[in-house]
Image: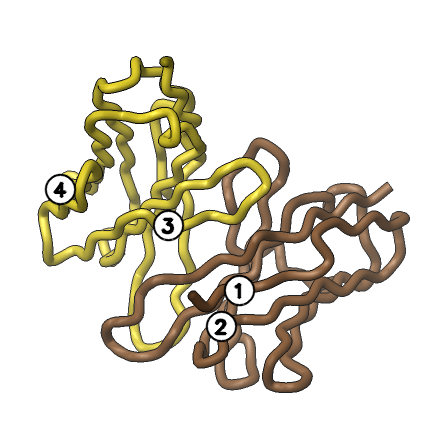
């Protein structure tokens, strides 16, 4: 069964450093998402991406964040200058196209720890 | 913006009994309501979903109900088993032709007592 994969599973970084989280969505999917989950809290929407551009972003997704689909298979989330409060699980998700495609498939997540 | 409230935050039931988790949503334009199960160290996995043109949906031991007028929806798990222990999230979304974000509830930690 196809699945969304994410690397690395755990990333530790120093405050102020840049990090890039990587995702490989399901191959025929066209919509891509990033969500985050701070420990013990709800999953929060960050950004959606379609047709090589951002469709929607939340207030969390400020100028420090960017997304890219550099090569047609990977989907990346970059945090330019990490803050302590960026520590969270980051989930990538993808969705197919068409009237019957509602389900977003989630990856296993990357745990980001900012020290 | 859309907000999804979920309760209870924790639920402990005897194996074999039923578990019910309830949610409310704020945006009447929401038309898709997925339920996710999250096991330790994993991402959310869809277990069942319901669209706004349907009042109830069942899949083996799992059922969801939706009351659009009251903006309530619920998850029912019958004949609970130890492997049902996990965190469950309700969610709401406005599905349209382009990408549609999912708004999650705060989660319910379900524990099944042997």
Hey, which quadrant is residue A79 in on the image?
bottom right
Chain under disc 2: A
Q: Earlier in the sequence, mark 3 or mark 4?
A: 3
Residue A39 on image: x %, y %: 63, 35
Closer to us: B38 or B29: B38
How far apart marks 3 and 4 lie (CA) works out to: 17 Å
How far apart marks 1 and 2 lie (CA) works out to: 5 Å
Closer to us: A6 or A65: A6
Task: Chain B: give its colour.
Answer: yellow
Residue beneath disc 2:
A26
Which chain does the brown colour mark? A
Q: Are discs 3 and 4 less than 8 Å apart at CB?
A: no
**Is residue A57 among the parts visible in the rendering?**
no
Q: Which mark is residue B2?
A: 3
- Look at the numbered disc 1 and give the secondary structure of its residue: loop
Residue beneath disc 4:
B67
A20 horizontally vs B20: left or right: right
Residue at 49% across, 38% down: B39
Residues indicated by labels 1 and 3 sit on the same polypeptide chain: no
Q: Earlier in the sequence, mark 1 or mark 2?
A: 1
Chain under disc 4: B
* Mark 4 closeness class: few <14, some 14–19, many ≥20 residues within 10 Å: some
Residue B27 on image: x %, y %: 29, 51
């Amino acid at each position: 069964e196809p699945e969304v994969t994410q690397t690395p599973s755990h990333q530790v970084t120093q405050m102020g450093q840049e990090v890039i989280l990587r995702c490989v969505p399901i191959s025929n999917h066209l919509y891509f998402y990033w969500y985050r989950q701070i420990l013990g809290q709800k999953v929060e929407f960050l950004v959606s991406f379609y047709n090589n551009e951002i469709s929607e972003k939340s207030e969390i997704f400020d100028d420090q964040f960017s997304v890219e689909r550099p090569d047609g298979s990977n989907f990346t989330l970059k945090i330019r200058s990490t803050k302590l409060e960026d520590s969270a699980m980051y989930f990538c998700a993808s969705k197919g196209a068409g009237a019957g495609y509602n389900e977003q498939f989630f990856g296993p997540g990357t745990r980001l720890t900012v020290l | 913006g859309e907000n999804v409230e979920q309760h209870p935050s924790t639920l402990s039931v005897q194996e074999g009994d039923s578990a019910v988790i309830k949610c409310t949503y704020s945006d009447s334009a929401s038309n898709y309501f997925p339920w996710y199960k999250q096991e330790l160290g994993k991402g959310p996995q869809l277990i069942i979903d319901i669209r706004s043109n349907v009042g109830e949906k069942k899949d083996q031991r799992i059922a969801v109900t939706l009351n659009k007028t009251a903006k309530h929806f619920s998850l029912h798990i019958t004949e609970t088993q130890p492997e049902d222990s996990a965190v469950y999230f309700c969610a709401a979304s406005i599905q349209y032709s382009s990408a549609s974000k999912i708004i999650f509830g705060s989660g319910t930690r379900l524990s099944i007592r042997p």
